[in-house]
Image (cartoon, helix red, strand yellow):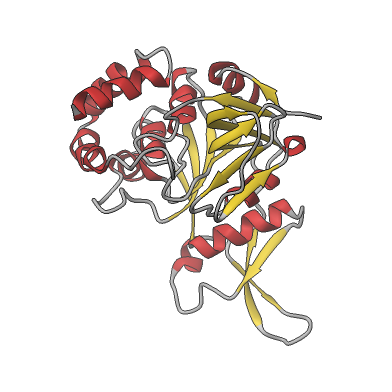
Amino acid sequence: MSARFLSLADAVAEHVQDGDCVALEGFTHLIPFAAGHEIIRQRRHDLHLVRMTPDLVYDQMIGMGCARKLTFSWGGNPGVGSLHRLRDAVERRWPHPLQLDEHSHAGMAAAFCAGAARLPFGVLRGYLDTDLPAHNSNIRRVQCPFTGESLAAVPAINPDVTILHAQCADRQGNVALHGIVGAAREAALAAKSLLVTVEEIVESLSPAMNGMLLPHWVVDAVAHCPGGAYPSYAQGYYERDNAFYRDWDAIARDREVFLAWMGEHVLNSADHRGFLGSLLERAA
């Protein structure tokens, strides 16, 4: 079965439903901002959001009322400070209470690997001498049947849908991404369905250093979405907008400022091109 080529709006409408467990993965780059914004525009709610390092995209989705639960590792604005909409949801239950399932990066990776292998849990040497297990009942201990060693165990993550951004796809729906790949492959294979936004549709895929290929039979939908990772970066296409990450700290601190900004730049944009244009105009 080959991937279907859809508009981003149609892909989100078909694959993301209220109440779903949704993983928008991409580690430091290739963060699927465009897909996150489309989920906001379509007013999806009651979602269980999953992501290693929530980044600004989840701060925006949480603040716009999309989320009931967050499974994550390290929640902050990289290089700047807190995610203020995440903090407001946890500390003051605005706009909705937010349940937290916090892990380390290694714990999240183990959980995605277990999900991809269709195993019930992942194991790792981790969480020793930390207080995180005392605050998260999903971190348990198991004894190795071969060595007797005590290991940490985390439940598998199997999203209803994983959404990735990648550099390109060919016309058969094979997807290639390169650079820092994080847990993208594992999150893709763990999911019930996979939606990928891409910078380019190409005739053939060229080999790339530290490249990864997702064959068309594991991809459910491809959406052509140039700039779909902005303001994060896409290796080989554009750089991270560090100024925006700094600016977001002030935007997100105040509820009214945040809502006004999201209304102007996300809700009132027909698609990601409107959002991208507003950021590039600011930068100019």
In the figure, 144 relative to 60: above or below?
Answer: below
Tell me the quadrant of the picture where the C terminus can be found.
Answer: top left
82 or 204: nearer the viewer: 204
Task: Tell me where residue 217 appears, x and y as whole percent.
Answer: 77, 36
- List the single residue furthest toward the bottom: 147
In the figure, 14 relative to 205: above or below?
Answer: above
In the figure, 112 relative to 163: above or below?
Answer: below
**Left of 199 or right of it: where is 264?**
left
Asked if residue 173 shows in the view, the reply is yes
Task: Tell me where residue 53 appears, x and y as whole percent.
Answer: 43, 51
**Left of 103 or right of it: where is 184?**
right
Residue shown at 34%/34% (left/top)? 94
**Left of 148 or right of it: where is 208?**
left
Asked if residue 16 shows in the view, the reply is no
Q: Quadrant of residue 239?
A: top left
Number of callouts: 0
**Left of 122 or right of it: where is 133?**
left
Q: Quadrant of residue 8?
A: top right
Residue shown at 28%/17% (left/top)? 264
Tell me the quadrant of the picture where the N terminus can be found.
Answer: top right
Residue shown at 63%/76% (left/top)? 151
Task: Tell me where residue 208 appears, x and y as whole percent.
Answer: 57, 50
In the figure, 120 relative to 147: above or below?
Answer: above
Task: Tell me where residue 275 appears, x and y as whole percent.
Answer: 34, 22
Residue shown at 63%/57% (left/top)? 111
